Image (tube, grey):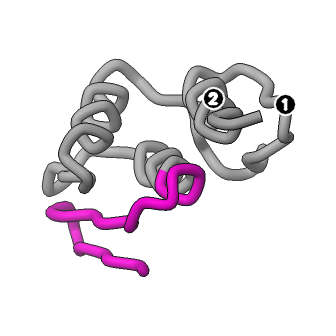
Amino acid sequence: MPGSKKDDVERLSRGQSTRAKIGNRSIGHRLTQKERALFEAAQRQGYLKLPVTGLRPNVTNVYRLWCEATGKEFIVKGGAHSERND
């Protein structure tokens, strides 16, 4: 079913169960309002821009899964360090 992996990432980010059983209980995935705003901006822009401090790794975890599901490049700018994984 096309798009189901993206749907599962969205469900995971909201703390709901996924059909594909992606995610891991020991890794945070549920997003706060602030993290959701960053995640949605990253989906539009094609990269995740992090503030310097004060953010849990959850948004990075979810964005990485979303990039894998959509075949996009995982790019993170800002924060304590920047990443680019092809």
Residue 9 at x, y = what percent? 61, 37
Secondary structure state at the residue bearing disc 1: loop
Between 13 and 10, which is closer to the camera in this rendering?
10
**Residue linked to disc 1:** 19
Examine the rendered structure and indicate whether residue 52 appears above or below residue 38. below
Give me the residue at 65% from left, 31% from top: 12
Amino acid type, callout 1? Arg
Near-viewer residue (79 or 4)? 4
Mark 1–mark 2 contact, CB under 8 Å? Answer: yes
Residue pictured at 30% horizontal, 66% vertical: 75
* In the displayed structure image, the side of residue 39 where residue 19 appears, left or right: right
The residue pinned by badge 2 equals 7
Q: What are the residue bounds of the magenta stretch?
A: 67-86
The CA distance from mark 1 to mark 2 is: 9 Å
The residue lying toward the viewer, choosing from 27 and 73, is 73
Pick the quarter of the image with the N terminus: top right
